[in-house]
Amino acid sequence: MEQQFPKEWVDSVSQQYFKYIDENRPVNYNYFRSPGAYELRYERDGFTEKEIAYYNEILHPPNIAILEHIVDHYEQYEGLQFLDNGCGFGVLSIFLKKIGISCYNYDTLDQIGFLPTFEPVITENVPLDVDVIVSSGMYINNLDYLKLSDLKYLMIDKDWKARSTTFSDTGHKITFKNIVPDLIKKFNLKRLEKVRDTIIIYGK
């Protein structure tokens, strides 16, 4: 991973990211100021503090696992169109672009509060030419995903795979339909493996 993402490059991306969110504070600033160390999730996901620090805490731990998996199986994913569900500011897509992987950014912007003008373009609509959905730290509930022409892989955060309710920062209960089972059934996906103790990979 250090070969694909040299420290000097990571530092440059991090500097731009932190400058942007300081000047454009998102609704959920507590999370976005340090996705890597938020609620110390990395400890139960099997990451060391040193690993999180390498990325200057701008990558949520499940996203590091996703990157590791793609790097280790690059030929399998090369040329496929990715989509990051609940992308936030789109940081994962910047890392994917660095290794030649195209990734759409999808977000409802509830946790941000505005349409960011950070480097990646973020859409509130679902493009239909997606081959791979990745989702960490967020549920999957957009029924438009069921309209995709062909979903080849699904990389889902274990914490959100089966969850059907969550709570906002203000304590209000949010109810939603989790469509992960629907995606698995419609596209005939099978569980392939678990990366670290955080991301579950489904595929044909």
Image (cartoon, helix red, strand yellow):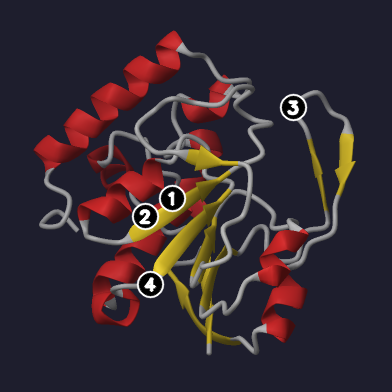
Mark linked to residue 80: 4
Q: Residues within 10 Å of mark 1 (few under 14, many from 20)?
A: many
State how far apart marks 4 and 2 are (Cα). 19 Å
State how far apart marks 1 and 4 are (Cα). 23 Å
Q: Nearer the viewer, residue 49 or 202?
A: 202
For this view, does 164 lie left or right of residue 123? Answer: right
Image x and y of residue 101, in percent: 30, 61
Q: Residue at x 31, y 73 (%)?
A: 79
State how far apart marks 1 and 3 are (Cα). 21 Å
Mark 1 or mark 3, earlier in chain = 1
Residue 143, quarter of picture:
bottom right
Q: Nearer the viewer, residue 135 or 120?
A: 120
Residue 56 versus residue 28 in the image, above or below:
below
Mark 4 or mark 2, earlier in chain = 2
SS class, disc 3: loop
Mark linked to residue 169: 3
Query: Residue flagged by tag 2: what amino acid is it?
Result: Ile
Q: Residue furthest top?
A: 23
Residue at image mark 2: 64
Residue at image mark 1: 61
Q: Residue at x 84, y 28 (%)?
A: 171
Q: Residues within 10 Å of mark 3 (few under 14, many from 20)?
A: few
SS class, disc 4: loop
SS class, disc 2: helix
Q: Residue at x 25, y 23 (%)?
A: 15
State how far apart marks 2 and 1 are (Cα). 5 Å
- Asked if the residues shown at circle 2 and circle 1 are in contact, with their CB atoms under 8 angstroms apart, the answer is yes
- Asked if the residues shown at circle 1 and circle 3 are in contact, with their CB atoms under 8 angstroms apart, the answer is no
